[in-house]
Image (cartoon, rainbow, N blue to C red):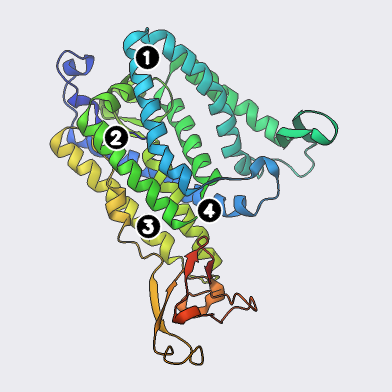
């Protein structure tokens, strides 16, 4: 669920519990907003790095989910239906029972996500003689030739230890709903989302970000549904940080918050650009760092505007990232000898900056010979389509 980028708890309307709270101090707000920005950057940066190895993994339990352009176009509609459904549930049924059911659901998901997050780090602390055994959880449907794998998850003893440690955090969250436990689960969800959700190309990312931009404009400014659900939804779907931490310590309760959707959605786009940079086999990661800086700028601008107008804001990542250099359209002279009077025509090629295409970033394929570096031009023009961030096919 995409959510407003940040919301100042001290700006709640009259009649709410937050209205009786003293206003947050400048120091407290600066600490809260700075912490939210830092917590947003960590899962994006490390999740993008882990997505590179995830894309190369042959382990079926770590295979990424690929988001297609059709999925991206449907996502704002599905998210809108989900958001409106939650809003109606909170209006019709008791908020206490709904949150109890959601707490149990996210308790299980949070333990699994946190265990997967800390597993690579915890492996460094296990001694070399640690008795590590391999396990496999396999769930199939049908029999014989019709047998189909539903779940195939491989793990070892080290993963079980990480699962036990994560369960401690899960019980802490379930009993206390403490904001630190909430953030641990939220960071784990964000990192796993950036790592395991992969866009199939840049155009899909633009469709996704553009659709959610419109989604945010409507649900944040057109209605109060987004903010109402975010306040009522007691689940680790947002990162929170108290603005009165300096006054009340760990028992502070005046929170600024950042939705996980504002981390994961831009994060999977940034992760795609990192994988693209690595495919170029160069030492510089220009696209990744450019988009990462654009994200920081967009998030900082959003928090600044929210602080000035005292209202939840849509996230300004899409306009910021539109300045990131992407695939370009090149025009090159058509090769001679393709027909009389046709050698001066131009050819439109979609540039994908593929390493196979050299410095110009063009990968071309001859329909007859299937050899790179040649273009067949029927009637003086090649028709090209972009078949992914690393491949361009022309015919």
- Residue 113 place in picture, x, y as percent: 56, 33
- Badge 4, how many Cα within 10 Å: few under 14, some, many 20+? some
Disc on the earlier residue, 4 or 2: 2
Query: Which circle, 1 or 4, is nearer the viewer?
Result: 1
Disc on the earlier residue, 3 or 2: 2
- Badge 2, how many Cα within 10 Å: few under 14, some, many 20+? many
Query: Which circle, 2 or 1, is nearer the viewer?
Result: 1
Q: Give the numbered dot on residue 89.
A: 1
At mark 4, the secondary structure is: helix
Using the image, determine if residue 242 lies above or below residue 126: above
- Residue 279 place in picture, x, y as percent: 55, 65
Residue at the limit of the structure toward the right, as seen here? 144
Residue 8 is left or right of residue 135, and the answer is left
Disc on the earlier residue, 1 or 4: 4
Disc 3 to disc 4, C-alpha distance: 14 Å
Q: Is label 4 in contact with label 2 (beta carbons under 8 Å)?
A: no
At mark 2, the secondary structure is: loop
Viewer-closest of 333 and 236: 333
Disc 1 to disc 4, C-alpha distance: 38 Å
**Residue where numbered disc 3 is placed:** 291
Disc on the earlier residue, 3 or 4: 4
Q: How many marks?
A: 4
**Residue where numbered disc 2 is placed:** 4
At mark 3, the secondary structure is: helix
Disc 3 to disc 2, C-alpha distance: 20 Å
Residue 259: quarter of image: top left
- Badge 3, how many Cα within 10 Å: few under 14, some, many 20+? many
**Residue where numbered disc 4 is placed:** 49
Query: Which circle, 4 or 2, is nearer the viewer?
Result: 2
């Amino acid at each position: 669920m995409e959510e407003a980028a940040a919301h100042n708890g001290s700006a709640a309307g009259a009649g709410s519990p937050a209205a009786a709270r003293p206003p947050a101090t400048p120091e407290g707000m600066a600490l809260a907003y700075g912490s939210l920005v830092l917590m947003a950057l960590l899962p994006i940066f490390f999740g993008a790095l882990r997505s590179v190895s995830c894309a190369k993994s042959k382990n079926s339990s770590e295979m990424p989910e690929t988001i297609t352009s059709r999925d991206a176009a449907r996502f704002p509609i599905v998210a809108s239906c989900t958001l409106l459904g939650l809003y109606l549930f909170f209006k019709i049924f008791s908020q206490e029972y709904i949150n109890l059911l959601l707490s149990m659901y996210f308790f299980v998901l949070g333990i699994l996500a946190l265990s997967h997050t800390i597993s690579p780090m915890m492996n460094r602390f296990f001694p070399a003689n640690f008795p590590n055994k391999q396990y496999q959880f396999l769930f199939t449907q049908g029999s014989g030739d019709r047998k189909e794998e539903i779940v195939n998850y491989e793990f070892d003893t080290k993963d079980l230890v990480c699962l036990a440690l994560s369960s401690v955090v899960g019980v802490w969250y379930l009993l206390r709903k403490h904001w630190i436990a909430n953030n641990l689960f939220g960071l784990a969800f964000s990192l796993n989302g950036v790592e395991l959700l992969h866009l199939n190309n840049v155009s899909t990312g633009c469709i996704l970000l553009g659709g959610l931009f419109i989604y945010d404009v409507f649900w944040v400014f057109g209605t109060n549904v987004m903010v109402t659900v975010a306040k009522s939804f007691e689940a680790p779907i947002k990162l929170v940080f108290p603005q009165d931490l300096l006054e009340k310590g760990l028992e502070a309760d005046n929170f600024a918050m950042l939705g996980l959707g504002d981390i994961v959605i831009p994060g999977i786009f940034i992760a795609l650009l990192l994988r693209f940079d690595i495919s170029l086999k160069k030492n510089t990661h220009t696209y990744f760092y450019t988009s990462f800086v654009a994200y920081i700028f967009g998030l900082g601008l959003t928090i600044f505007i929210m602080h000035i107008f005292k209202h939840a804001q849509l996230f300004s990542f899409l306009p910021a990232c539109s300045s990131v250099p992407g695939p370009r359209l090149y025009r090159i002279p058509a090769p001679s000898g393709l027909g009389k009077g046709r050698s001066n025509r131009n050819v439109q090629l979609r540039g994908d900056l593929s390493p196979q295409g050299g410095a110009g970033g063009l990968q071309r394929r001859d329909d007859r010979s299937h050899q790179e570096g040649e273009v067949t031009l029927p009637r003086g023009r090649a028709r090209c389509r972009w078949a992914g961030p690393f491949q361009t096919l022309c015919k």
